[in-house]
Amino acid sequence: MKKSAFCLITILCMTSLFLASCSSMPKNAGSNKVKNKAESYAITADGLYKNGEFSHAVQYYKRSLTQNILADNIPGIINNLNSLGHCSIAVEEYDDAFNYFQTAYDTADEIDDNEAMAVSLSNLGLCHLLQNDTVQAETMFCRALEIAESDRTKSHIYYNFGLLYHQEQKYPQAMEYAISSAEINQKLKDEANMADIHYLMASIYMHTDDTDNGEEQIQLALELDKKYENTADIAKDYRLYSAIEGKKGNKELETKLLRKSDEIYEAAGMHKQTSR
């Protein structure tokens, strides 16, 4: 594991040195101004992440992290660390992702923030899952669900359980958790996150040879990802859509959709991924 590269202690030490060198800095500098700057950087990073510009997103998440450290904004720091972890996952740098998520969890634990701990544990579980450690992933998801407080976080954990059982080819259980996640999202009117759930359901249907329902679900995922301009996910949607049409025997459409996915990956300069 690469422990030093993303250690919060190192960042804090660097920030302390910076502050020590700025002797003219006013004692009562407005922390809200600094927090606002941190939020602005994070919003920019979110947009870059959606467009698949992961390396640029990292730069802005790190700028946000620096500002949150300056303001001693612990919740902001935790959010930045989890976001950086997801950027690392996007480029398959799982050791880096693990360290970001673990630091986020440790930071949340220090302030007894159960909700932030649950989010970080769920992310750690996802990291284990992507490295095919389903046992450890399930342990993390269970721990996260025990302490999760908000419906939004519970929905994300249910979704991750769906991914877990999908990977284990336990498709009925995977669908059960996908439906549970969808029900919460619908109650919250969280349309943007429904795209991931539609995608998961589409994949479950494809693997259980229900290609008609699979086609319907991937079209819903694609519609939402286009609406919210999630470039990386649009490319993945077309890839799964192509696989579903191939299974239905629509070879011409399969080729067309796969080509569309490749074009988006190429235009965005992204590494091709076969799943979310």
Image: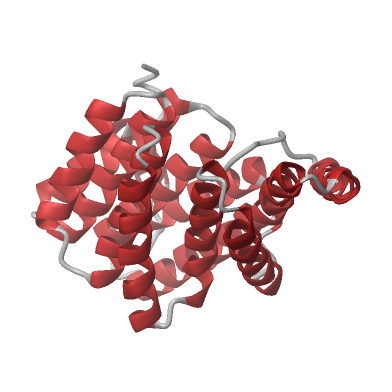
Task: Report whether 109 appears left or right of 216.
Answer: left
Q: How is the image coloured?
A: secondary structure
Seen in the picture, residue 201 relative to 1 is either above or below; the reply is below
For residue 214, side relative to residue 107 (left or right): right
Residue in view at x 49 percent, y 68 percent: 194
Instruction: Name the residue rendered at 24%, 43% in the picture.
Output: 121
Q: Position of residue 261 (x, y in %)?
A: 80, 47
Residue 120 visible from this viewpoint: yes
For residue 113, say whether it is visible.
Answer: no
Q: Is residue 230 above or below residue 99?
A: below
Frontmost residue, 236 versus 54 = 236
- Residue 160 horizontal/vertical position (percent): 35, 48
Q: Position of residue 120 (x, y in %)?
A: 27, 47
Quarter-wise, where is residue 239 in the image?
top right
On-image quarter of the C terminus? top right
Answer left or right for 260 relative to 127: right
Q: Quadrant of residue 95?
A: top left
- Residue drawn at (67%, 53%) of the image: 237
Count of all numbered marks drawn on residues in the image: 0
Query: Which image quarter is the N terminus in?
Result: top left
x, y percentage for residue 180? 30, 65
Horizontal side of 212 relative to 148 (left or right) equals right
The residue lying at 30 percent from left, 29 percent from top is 134
